Image (cartoon, rainbow, N blue to C red):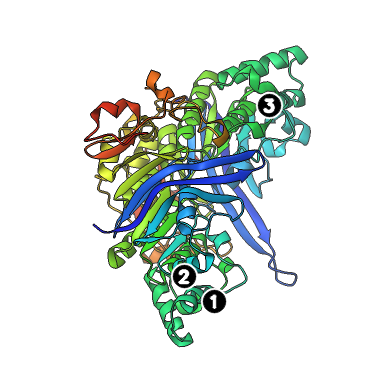
Amino acid sequence: MENEKVLEVIHLKKYYTVNNGWFSKGQQVKAVDDVSFSLYKGETLGLVGESGCGKSTTGRTILQLSKPTDGKVIFEGTDINQLNDRTMRQLRRKMQMIFQDPYASLDPHKTIQQILTEPLNVHGLYNKKERLEKVREMLKIIGLTDAYLTRYPNELSGGQRQRIAIARAVILQPTFIVADEPVSALDVSVQAQVINLLMYLQKEFQLTYLFISHDLNVVRHITDRIIVMYLGRVVEVTTTEELFNHPKHPYTCALLSAIPIKNPDEKKERIILSGEVPSPVNPPKGCPFHERCPKAMDICSKTVPHQISVSDGHWVTCHLYSNENHTTETKLSF
Amino acid sequence: MKNILDVSNLEVEFQTRRGSVRPLRGVSFQVHEGETLGIVGESGCGKSVTSLAVMGLLPRGKSEISRGQVLFEGQNITHLKERDKRKLRGNKMSMIFQEPMTSLNPVFTIGDQLSQPLKKHTRLGNKEIMVKIIEMLKLVGIPRPDQIVQQYPHQLSGGMRQRVMICLAIICKPDLLIADEPTTALDVTIQAQIINLLKKIKHETNMSIIFITHDLGVVAEICDRVIVMYTGQIVEEADVRTFFNHPKHPYSKGLLASMPKEDERKQPLMTIRGHVPSLNELPSGCTFSNRCPMAFAKCHVAPPTVHLKEQMCRCWLYADEQEGGSDGK
């Protein structure tokens, strides 16, 4: 892994206030609660967890699509929370996003050419002729012909639309892309095509991905490192191989054991978790996972665990590992 | 083994503004007593239409069963009157849908909704109904059932709602349960819980299940036999082990190969080129021929249904390996 940091997220927090009617006092939802990590050039970092764990909010908050409540996001050395709107807009060229649903993320009234030219117009790149040239080139890269220039999104299949959405993000030659469940809405055979395209583009343009997904098979295939989140908090961070071979946090273990088998002959030990993810409005005290944790101890319901390094680059937020001889307490250096 | 369901040569026609299309083009299969049959395929392959046709839930006026028949426990239910269909649905056969929020009625309590099939199909009194409901809610693993019956669907989480849906579907002890993508909208840990629950129910009641999904991992978990559908036809049918270990049809092979493998991380995945054609632009002959890596001259003609030793497959590649006579068209 190259050591050039593209992005650094420090103690990122995003709280929402929910109102349950006129007279009740607003309650706070800690959608993202003290999340810190770094992204290195050219890597794919996976962000996994179940719905409501805050993975999408993390992605959106990093891109300033919603303002963080607290914490810093440092992109190529600049703290982007401090930037004014104009500079931020210029910086957006370097950081792009791909959304889950290609049916909702493309404007149905625009042709493919208009959709792909728009980001170039917004950022005032190239002249008119060069823009068209650029769009054609991009279409070729994603495997569509020039005939698609005049088509509208509704004439395209789901996979083709997602290719267009990817092309729209990549055409600005960004360094960093947040891909939020980019293949979840696609059919199995098309999913593989789009994954291949993402991997190809990454090599071709040295892209850095934050890959948000709940599909662990896909995440295992495409990522270099993985962050596991639960109820707005990071529970485990490590390389993909380490995570799948030596998961440490009881939640990670349960999550991995829930992946369906690949072949009926495969035998798999299942850890079936009881209950479901608790509401983030009223998270359990102490470790947010303790109510469902098969290995919960007394301390878990009382104190929030700290992030602990169990081996080089492998961090776990769990009391199980706190009394061993590990260097305790994080200083954001994973 | 006794057949619970026998579908033969089923064709369904939809009327659209651009003329009629046929989402099902001659589908035949059986479901045996106590088995779980998986129907796999991508969107638009006809797997949901098949289940709606079996349940008699196709939208009236816009669609019809144009050919073929559905036998349920020996009774021809293809063109049954609505009144008679109602006697079967929720009683002898029932269905679980993908999205538990949209398939439960938001203005009735869980207890109200669960009592409906019992009021309709049994002669139980109100008290007995309540006892039965609580007993069934316990069976599907719902904690505090006596409180849950008073609650409305929006007060429950996704996994809980799906349990209520399953409870609703099995409360009259049907012989056939159709589950249409029951775990697709759920998280993996909840999916594992629901699959375990369905396995348990099947084990305890000997119910036959049709399990419709696009997720091959789920098929490996729960199914005994698999049908692969493509553009409204069955292209392969095999028991689950044969399907995963020796798939025959190029489409089945493609589907299995495009699953990410553990030992090939970061490598380009195998893909099936192109995309599923829409129903009004199907290629002539074999409808998979324009995406098939093995396509050859013969594929311009509709392929025969080939019965091999272990499986059935609709492909010209195996036309010479036919076991016994041919029944291809």
Q: Position of residue A220 (x, y in %)?
A: 40, 37
Q: Name which residue type carries label 1.
A: Asp
Residue A101 in view: no
What separation in Å lies between label 2 and label 3 (alpha carbons)?
Answer: 49 Å
- Are the residues under marks 2 and 1 on the same chain? yes
Q: Chain of mark 1?
A: B
Q: Position of residue A151 (x, y in %)?
A: 68, 26
Give SS at disc 2. Answer: helix
Q: Looking at the image, is B134 positioned above or below residue B96?
A: below
Tell me, for residue B55, which label it has, or none: none
- Are the residues under marks 2 and 3 on the same chain? no
**Mark in the foreground, 2 or 1:** 2
Give SS at disc 1. Answer: helix
Q: In terms of depth relative to the viewer, which is nearer, B210 or A324?
A: B210
For image coordinates 75% across by 12% down, the residue present is A129
Q: According to the image, label 3 marks what residue?
A: A151
For image coordinates 60% across by 18% down, the residue present is A145
Q: Looking at the image, is A124 positioned above or below residue B312?
A: above
Tell me, for residue B112, which label it has, or none: 1
Label 1: few (<14), some or many (≥20) within 10 Å? Answer: some
Q: In terms of depth relative to the viewer, which is nearer, B153 or A93?
A: B153
Q: According to the image, label 2 marks what residue?
A: B87
What separation in Å lies between label 2 and label 1 (alpha carbons)?
Answer: 19 Å
Left or right of A104 in this view: A296: left
Q: Name which residue type carries label 3.
A: Arg
